[in-house]
Amino acid sequence: MGYVRHKDGVTEDFILSGTYELEVASERVPATVHLAPLYDPTGARVRS
């Protein structure tokens, strides 16, 4: 899990236009962007 920062601000289009990596144990691994929360507080996905 990570976050995106930019000095001019971050928009949805900015995030979707990029490619990202995370550093894990001194290795860079590709990251997938998710704009929706990964947490489902109401459990709606579990019941569907």
Image (cartoon, rainbow, N blue to C red):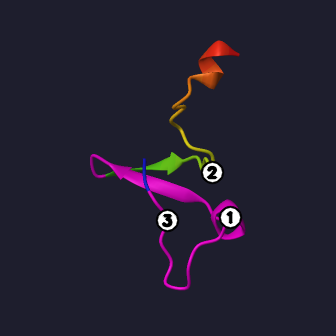
Residue wearing tag 2: 35
| Image spot of residue 18 (x, y percent) | 64, 64
Dot 2, crowdedness within 10 Å: few (<14), some or many (≥20)?
few
Q: Earlier in the sequence, mark 1 or mark 2?
A: 1
Give me the C-alpha separation between circle 1 and circle 2. Answer: 8 Å
SS for callout 2: loop
- Of 11 and 31, the residue lying toward us: 11
Write the residue at 49% across / 65% down. 4
Residue wearing tag 3: 4
* Residue found at the very far front of the displayed protein: 42
Give me the C-alpha separation between circle 2 and circle 3. Answer: 11 Å
The three-letter amino acid code for the residue at tag 1 is: Glu
Residue wearing tag 1: 12
Tell me, yes or no, whether the two marked residues, 3 and 1, touch with CB atoms within 8 Å: no
Marks 2, 3: nearer the viewer? 2
| Image spot of residue 21 (x, y percent) | 48, 55
Give the extent of the magenta segment: 3-26
- Of 43 and 4, the residue lying toward us: 43
Write the residue at 68% across / 64% down. 12
Compared across the picture, whether 14 is left or right of 43 comes to right
Q: Earlier in the sequence, mark 3 or mark 1?
A: 3
The three-letter amino acid code for the residue at tag 2 is: Leu
The three-letter amino acid code for the residue at tag 3 is: Val
Compared across the picture, whether 6 is left or right of 27 comes to right
